[in-house]
Amino acid sequence: MDIPRSTFDNLDPQKRGRVLEESLHEFAEHGYHQASVNRIVGRLGIAKGSLFQYFGTKEGLFRHLFARALDEIKTPLKAIRDADSAEPFPVRLRRVFVAGAAFARSHPLIWRVYRRMVTQDDFPLRALLLSQVRDEALTYFRELVEGGQARGELRPDVDPQAASFLIEAALDRALTAQDSPLLDAGFGLSHDDETTRQARLSVLADILSQGLLLAPRGYSDDNRNINN
């Protein structure tokens, strides 16, 4: 990832924040191709050359915004993964789902840019940046599952890679459903009530956890009740 020039790092924090917010708003509103550096600098009241001095190109600006967004979502998720080992896996997974949904709702511009990237085949850097997001997410969930296995909470026969794929897919759909009643299909994730939304996210996380947890002692395939 490109990093901003030292001139940008040396700006007043409030001015840095304005540059990033206005730039993010432009990409969220217009996508990458139609995003205008002229509009950004016009709203900021700075010379066009200043923005290029900070980031080199429009691509450099976008890469920096993307890297910052990724760092922001990773911070709370890492805290959940690295929590006290006494915290059970189902509790961790519930917290991950709730934290991910909260981030998407509290950072609507970042989420809108991400959704544009997912749905637009001609979005520049799409393959590279989406691969990075997916790789980071799958690594995170694999480590979460492997940690649960190491603590003896989860079934040792579960493939961590397959489990991480399933968890990531469910979470991605859940986040998308928050903004789309059609995709939500009445489940409750697009509900305005935060308590309802968190409850539904917890239901999803618990169902996934139940498939991964060790069976209770004394439980086996032989004593299942199966009606033929």
Image (tube, rainbow, N blue to C red):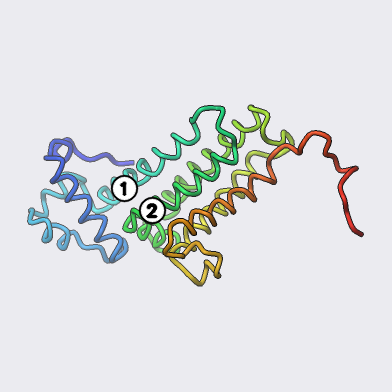
Of the residues tagged 2 and 1, which is closer to the observer? 1
Distance between the alpha carbons at the discs numbered 2 and 1: 9 Å
Quarter of the image where the C terminus is located: bottom right
| Location of residue 173 in the rendering, given as x and y in whole percent from the top left corner | 53, 59
- Tag 2 secondary structure: loop
> Which residue is label 2 attached to?
125
- Amino acid type indicated by mark 1: Arg
Tell which of 144 and 58 is nearer to you.
144
User: Quick check: 164 left or right of 59?
Assistant: right
Determine the residue positioned at 85% across, 40% down: 220
Tell which of 74 and 198 is nearer to you.
198
- Amino acid type indicated by mark 2: Leu
- Tag 1 secondary structure: helix
User: Quick check: 206 left or right of 35?
Assistant: right
Between discs 2 and 1, the one toward the N terminus: 1
Label 2: few (<14), some or many (≥20) within 10 Å?
some
| Location of residue 206 in the rendering, given as x and y in whole percent from the top left corner | 61, 48
Contact, mark 2 vs mark 1 (Cβ under 8 Å): yes
Report which quarter residue 107 is drawn in.
bottom left
User: Quick check: 117 left or right of 60?
Assistant: right
Determine the residue positioned at 51% across, 27% down: 84
| Vertical comparison of 85 with 228: above or below | above
| Location of residue 91 in the rendering, given as x and y in whole percent from the top left corner | 56, 40
Determine the residue positioned at 59% across, 44% down: 164
Q: Residue furthest bottom?
A: 182
| Location of residue 94 in the rendering, given as x and y in whole percent from the top left corner | 54, 45
| Vertical comparison of 26 with 8: above or below | below
> Which residue is label 1 attached to?
63
Report which quarter residue 45 is drawn in.
bottom left
Q: How many marks?
A: 2
Report which quarter residue 138 is drawn in.
top right
